[in-house]
Amino acid sequence: MKIALFTKEINNLKTEALVIGLHEDFDIAIHLQELGGQVVFDERLEAQVSSRRIDTGFASFMNYVWASPRTYAKHKIRSRWHMYTVVGLCAIGYLPVRIMHRGYDPKRDCFAWSRVFAPSTAMQRVDPTANVA
């Protein structure tokens, strides 16, 4: 019963986080700590990183970049100030990185200007929790 209630609460937190533009994983971890849970760093874990966010428009990209500072601000965590430098660097680096990302031709393993201005072929990411009850 406790697990079912916990799962429901986590899903509510995820929904709230997505609606107000927070990083849901940070938000859930902060809530868990507030409830006495322990969140730890495990250096053995590995995660893949994709570049799909750079293939969105600038406003959408920056909305995503601002999610971390928004999450920390919502919880009144003061250590968020270092993030503003990262936000600035992301804003400055968006265009050059987007050009490099869009222009890379994986078939020829080289840069092609024709790909920079071609329509995006990026696919929407499927929510891995969509089928979780």
Image (cartoon, grey):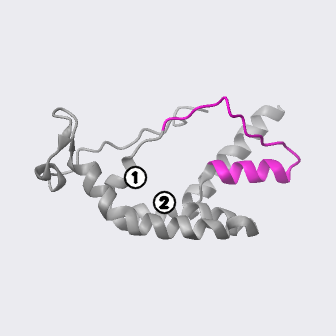
Q: Is residue 89 above or below residue 30?
A: below
Q: Which element carries disc 1, helix, strand or loop?
A: helix
Work out whether mark 2 precedes mark 1 in sequence or the reverse, and give the earlier one.
1
On-image quarter of the N terminus: top right
Which amino acid lies under the numbered mark 1 shown in the image of this protein? Arg
CB under 8 Å between callouts 2 and 1?
A: yes
Q: Whole-percent x and y of residue 53? A: 40, 52
Farthest residue toward the right?
36
Q: Quadrant of residue 41?
A: top right
Q: Quadrant of residue 20?
A: bottom right
Q: Which mark is residue 79?
A: none
| Label 1 crowd bin: few (<14), some (14–19), many (20+), radius 10 Å | some
Q: Whole-percent x and y of residue 102? A: 24, 50
Q: Quadrant of residue 97?
A: bottom left
Q: Which residues are magenta?
A: 25-48
Reading the image, the residue beneath label 1 is 53
Please tell me which residue is depicted at 56% across the width and 62% down the height of the picture: 67
Determine whether, in the image, residue 64 is placed left or right of residue 113: right
